[in-house]
Image: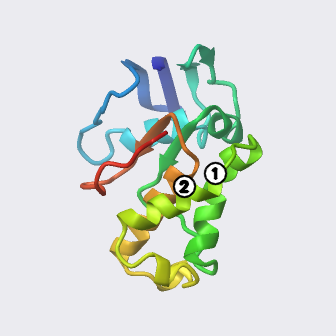
Amino acid sequence: MLDVDKVNKAFSGLATVNDVSFQIRASDIVGLIGPNGAGKSTLLNALMGVLPMRGSLPFDGEDVARLTLEGRVMRGIALMPEKRELFGSMSLEDNLVLGGWRPRRQRVAGWRDHMDTLCTLFPRPKERRTQLAGTLSGGEHQMLAFGRALMGQPKLLMLEGVGHFPPAFPMS
């Protein structure tokens, strides 16, 4: 599914990610572990297209290394960042709808129905659909960020800085 091949990322000439290579097959669960400053977040952000990188990145048979962030999202790659990066002045529901950008753009029938499935996984979601994301607790922020990532129906979901996550969710 994903073949990370000699990926490199440097800041001001200092290599933070140096010739990283690994493969991920469909249905694999892979963890990156290491001390603070080891380059885990940098690597995930480079794989997602948030940061420029060198190397090749074949994903589902196509090298996505030169694609933009949006191009990678459209191919089915998603990242739930550690800082969650929610839109605090928008409702829970609006944040989830934004997460559905990929299936909506690809005209996937019933893409919005995915939200109903998500609402069965998280506590009290239906009554909070109109609540502003900025007023949620920390744990609720994490659940919303996870739900937003799942709304895109990704083929590959990368979770940054997550110690635990909700129960199994059907990805297709």
Q: How is colour applied across the structure in the image?
A: rainbow
Pointer 2 local density, CA inside 10 Å: few below 14, some 14–19, many at least 20: many
Q: Residue 80: give x, y in percent of width and height.
A: 46, 52
Is 89 placed above or below 76 here? below
> CB atoms at circles 1 and 2 under 8 Å apart?
yes
Where does label 2 land, which residue? 114
What residue do we see at 58% from left, 13% from top? 61
Q: Nearer the viewer, residue 44 or 58?
A: 58
Badge 2 element? helix
Q: Which residue corresponds to the image point at 67% horizontal and 37% vertical from the top-left?
A: 74
Q: In this view, does 94 lie above or below 9?
A: below
Amino acid on which the number 2 mark rests in the picture: His
Residue 100, numbered label: none
Residue 131, quarter of the rendered image:
bottom right
Instruction: Note whether residue 100 is visible.
Output: yes
**Total numbered labels placed on residues in the image:** 2
Vertically, is 168 above or below 136?
above
Indicate the amino acid at tag 1: Trp
Residue under the image location 56 percent in, 19 percent down: 60
Estimate the x, y position of residue 172 in percent, counting from the top left. 49, 39
Q: What element carries label 1?
A: helix
Badge 1 density bin: few <14, some 14–19, many ≥20, Cα 10 Å: some
In x, y percent, where is residue 171? 45, 41
The mark found on residue 111 in the picture is: 1
Q: Distance between the residues labelled 1 and 2?
A: 6 Å
Query: Is residue 12 something one can see in this rendering?
Result: no
Instruction: Identify the residue at image location x=74%, y=40%.
Output: 106
Query: In which quadrant of the rendered view does residue 58 lie?
Result: top right
